[in-house]
Amino acid sequence: MAQEITAEIISIGDELLIGQTINTNAGWMGEQLALIGVRAKRVLTIGDDRTEILDALGSATCDVVLITGGLGPTKDDITKHTLCEFFGTRLVRNKEVEARIMAMFVRMGRDPRDILPVNLAQADLPENCTVLPNERGTASGMWFERDGRVYVSMPGVPYEMRSIMRTGVLPRLQERFRPPTIIHRTILTTGLGESMLAKRIADWEDSLAAEGIKLAYLPSPGIVKLRLSTYAEADGPAATERVDRKARELSVLIPELIYGEGEDRLQQVVGRLLKERGQTLSLAESCTGGYVSHLITSIPGSSAYFTGGVVSYHNAVKMEELGIPSDMLELNGAVSQPVVEQMASGVRTALRTDWSVAYSGVAGPDGGTPEKPVGTVWIAVAGPDGVRSKLVNFPGTRDLVIERSALAGLNMLRKRILEAQ
Amino acid sequence: MAQEITAEIISIGDELLIGQTINTNAGWMGEQLALIGVRAKRVLTIGDDRTEILDALGSATCDVVLITGGLGPTKDDITKHTLCEFFGTRLVRNKEVEARIMAMFVRMGRDPRDILPVNLAQADLPENCTVLPNERGTASGMWFERDGRVYVSMPGVPYEMRSIMRTGVLPRLQERFRPPTIIHRTILTTGLGESMLAKRIADWEDSLAAEGIKLAYLPSPGIVKLRLSTYAEADGPAATERVDRKARELSVLIPELIYGEGEDRLQQVVGRLLKERGQTLSLAESCTGGYVSHLITSIPGSSAYFTGGVVSYHNAVKMEELGIPSDMLELNGAVSQPVVEQMASGVRTALRTDWSVAYSGVAGPDGGTPEKPVGTVWIAVAGPDGVRSKLVNFPGTRDLVIERSALAGLNMLRKRILEAQ
């Protein structure tokens, strides 16, 4: 086997050390590195402190050193100067980067004469680095090499770092180190917790070892991702075939639990199904308070199938906008099967869509009763073949009840659309 | 000045390096340490690997070394054995801990004869450590001292770690080191980017050094937090007074930009203002697609002031639910001042609320035109004193345009409510 390529991550920022900002960058970078066959061995988080940064750079032992943070325009951001000191170089104004920064501010409607010197100083970059363009901000990525080791400095703003990683860093690392290829497939499931799922697929899981395939369970609220991975070595196609075969076996075993693959989100999958069929969706949300609309509309192009929604937090809105009779509300309460079904039918009729989903429940922390404790949620899906509903009960905080209810409703919709074929 | 007490955190776990679990422990521990005057200098995250753990322990330089993770009952958890190796000690069965583990399983309904040897082996602890009881799990905290340095090992499960920190670690550290107290205040601003804000408050910032106060800028999309901190030393009240005075000066300097303090979120602040006045809110969202409703309803108790909202993604919904005349839409387009103002007035009338906020814009990535590029958003606030609107333009991804638009609208609402007093 080829020698393993290792990486270490240096996260710079006082805010990371005092809990003001959670270091989500390091985990994401480790995951992306793993996908190209580079193993993240350690993450070191330090403050915006010259000595600490120099120490960290000087004691690096891995092939790749990825550095984030401390590239902002203010005085406390000292990473760039410290990199110059470490690599024995100086800052020079990069005209190309300067022009990009100017253009960015002009696009935002700023008068070019009002652009501050500190903003333009973001174009002052170490003379001996390769500049990795940042299309989403003013701090460029910087690629250095020394003693066979690669150092890359990036801004700590997550979407700027991710963009530079995707377009600049990951392709260059593959080119530079040619790490052994790892074949991955990540299968996304919803509807069963980790231990129940493990029990259900135990025999299939046992059969993986003989194929040289590793399985990882990656749980998050409402979702369990199953990641299959194996080294490709010389036998690229054979490894892919092995993983694909096992993935097919799994899809026969638990078809109703699998909603997608890789980076798919359930709202994307649902959107794709609707788009393929030329159908439309509306929503009536009570306890989820607009969160499901937000999930749906977070997908670019969702206006092709999402017509709109009603957030009916008060009963008056339920009655007027969704046509819920007041005696139905009085008799059953808002969190009930007749009301949620009427919410779904009502919004589907009012907004003239093919499908609708409605939610009514108790998200907590207050408002629970012995009969309808916190976490009790009615969900209804209305479609061309009528309205059906389901009662769920989720433990956990308000955020978790909302998150898991949202997913449960979208999964009900997904299954209904597929059934209706 | 008393000597500063420093700490380093060693987070152990393969899952932290591949993005499976985000390291939220380290930030929380850093925050708790800061509150008792201990400065977290660095966080090192490594895998469940003997050599890496020994290296990390051996190269510690701070007064306090807090270690989490790798204390589970399975084979890949090797922290305890590695600690024995490092401190030259051996594991002995702790009868008290064994009894606690037995009692815990019995409480969970397990027959004592069915308790597995691996579970009881959690009571095997290093002979020379002080055991810190874990009331929420089977892995005990372990306190070691060597060469004037304190090492504490804790489980990585967040609520177990937090419980051991609160009851065992923090009080003992205060007792052992008597660290100087740090006074913090974090002031939350919105409406001006980091560099423009820094320019605006430059003179005030320059005046902080003479008072021994440090300032940190903590930016996130649409928000810049300003953190003031200083050592209390012997003069506790005087330090608090110094920080409070500077905070007051700032609130006179940029009153319109400050929306809160500490952990406040803008939607909480707005909610508080509405509640105090017994007023209500409704929303009409186009490009923000339900996100603002979600923010508002993520606050427990928001039903006291939030009546509901309409997500009008399609023009038909704008016309029917919000009373937008079709010729107004044709003449101006959906992303326009007359339409957004009518959306705000329409939802305010329909849902009979005191206030309403409406959004119509181009969130992207598609749908932009030369006249109305991606990021163009009209926002209107309607209230007892009429409707007013504002055109904003935000760079960045779809998510960011939505996030920043949401905040901008909530801040417009906040200011209108305060003006209307």
Image: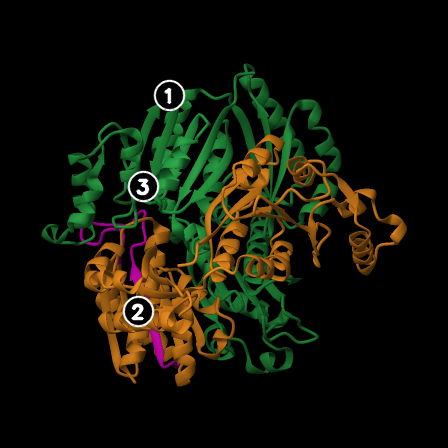
Chain colours: A green, B orange
What residue occupies the far right of the structure in this picture? B113
Q: Secondary structure at mark 2?
A: strand
Q: Is residue B356 magenta?
A: yes
- Chain letter belonging to callout 3: A
- Chain letter belonging to callout 2: B
- Chain letter belonging to callout 1: A
Name the side, left or right, on which B221 lies relative to A371: left
Of the image marks 3 and 1, the number of the one nearer the N terminus = 3
Residue topped by disc 2: B258
Residue B413: x %, y % from top left: 32, 73
Instruction: Report whether mark 3 lies on the same chain as mark 2.
Output: no
Name the side, left or right, on which A187 lies relative to A280: right
Residue B143 seen from this side: yes
Q: Which mark is residue A79?
A: 3
Q: Which image quarter holds the N terminus of chain B?
A: bottom left
Q: Nearer the viewer, residue B271 or B385?
A: B271
Distance (Cα) linking label 3 and label 2? 29 Å
Residue B334 seen from this side: no
- Disc 3 marks which amino acid? Thr
Mark 1 surroundings within 10 Å by alpha-carbon count, few (fewer than 14), some (14 through 19), many (20 or more): few
Q: Which residues are magenta?
A: B352-376
Q: Which mark is residue A147?
A: 1
Magenta span: predominant SS is loop
- Judged by depth in the image, the label closer to the viewer, 3 or 2, is 3
Q: Which mark is residue B360?
A: none
Distance (Cα) linking label 1 and label 2? 49 Å
